[in-house]
Amino acid sequence: MFIISIGESWLALAVLFLIIIGTFEFKAMLKIRGNKILLVPIILGELVLIWGAWSQSANWFNYGLGLSFFIILFYSVFKYPKINLEDISANIFILIYVGWSLTHIVLLRNTFNGALVLVYLFLVIWSTDTGAYFAGRFFGKTKLAPLVSPKKTIEGAIGGLLLGLLAAFIFNLFFQIFTAPILFVSAFLISILGQVGDLVESCFKRLVGIKDSGKIIPGHGGILDRFDSTILTAPALFYLLAFLDK
């Protein structure tokens, strides 16, 4: 929370750290499947993405994605046939899934009341996780996605949504950063997409046969395990607010 409050380059560096660690975690996951991951162009692209978000460049996404895209394609020509189409797709996917998505934390901080908006985002995410856990534990009967995450239930998802909405309402009572319609839509979107993001990450881990994406946080897994909900919700909230601001 301290880094969120001061923002500026400190937040950009913190997010860059998360992105790079997440990139290494995803590389390790794909290595199990035999994919060749090119860290240099991916990280270069992520550096440009963070720089663009921090400097509020109008073309931040084009610069970051374009740089990595051309380097990856250039490399593939000279490494043919050691690198294939699946490898190229995997490299670009990492840049978007990890780098582009989490860069929106910095972009959200740059918005009006950005520090409060970020706290609001994480509050709804954490409240949803808490509500889903306890609702699923005490009332869960109907499996939500048994092949992806056997312990998750529809009752748990509903409980997570309700607690996420309640937390958003209480937060807005104190800080009043959103009107009632925007509050409801944003909280609903964050809660639903946060749970989808969790399932997406679980799907990836099942595809490669691992339990956690990493071990950087003892007992809690890796960066991707901790920020799987943020990967979808940060961009969604940013573009929702940008759309409503027009």
Image (cartoon, rainbow, N blue to C red):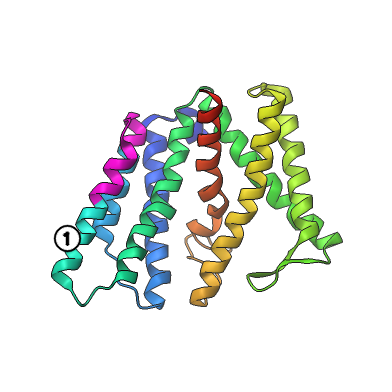
Give the tally of numbered discs: 1
Which residue is nearer to you in this view: 212 or 154? 154
Which of the 4 quarters of the picture holds residue 120?
top right
Is any atom of residue 210 visible in this view?
A: no
Q: List x then y, in percent, for residue 178.
A: 65, 24
Query: Among all residues in the image, which is located at the extreme left?
Result: 78
Residue at the (78%, 52%) spot, across then down = 158
Residue at the (34%, 64%) spot, across then down = 89
Q: List x then y, in percent, for residue 85.
A: 30, 70
Query: Is 128 included in the stretch rendered in magenta?
Result: no
Is any atom of residue 202 visible in this view?
A: yes
Q: Is residue 125 left or right of residue 3?
A: right
* Residue ID for mark 1: 74
Q: Is residue 15 left or right of residue 169?
A: left
Residue at the (35%, 33%) spot, across then down = 54
Residue at the (44%, 28%) spot, across then down = 110
Which secondary structure type mostly characterizes the magenta part of the structure?
Answer: helix
Which residue is nearer to you in this view: 24 or 206? 206
Q: List x then y, in percent, for residue 230.
A: 54, 47
| 218 is higher (above) or lower (below) than 58 | below
Q: Is residue 178 left or right of residue 221?
A: right
Query: Is 55 included in the stretch rendered in magenta?
Result: yes
Residues shaded magenta: 52-67
Mark 1 Cα shell of 10 Å, populated few (<14), some (14-19), many (≥20): few
Which residue is nearer to you in this view: 85 or 93? 85
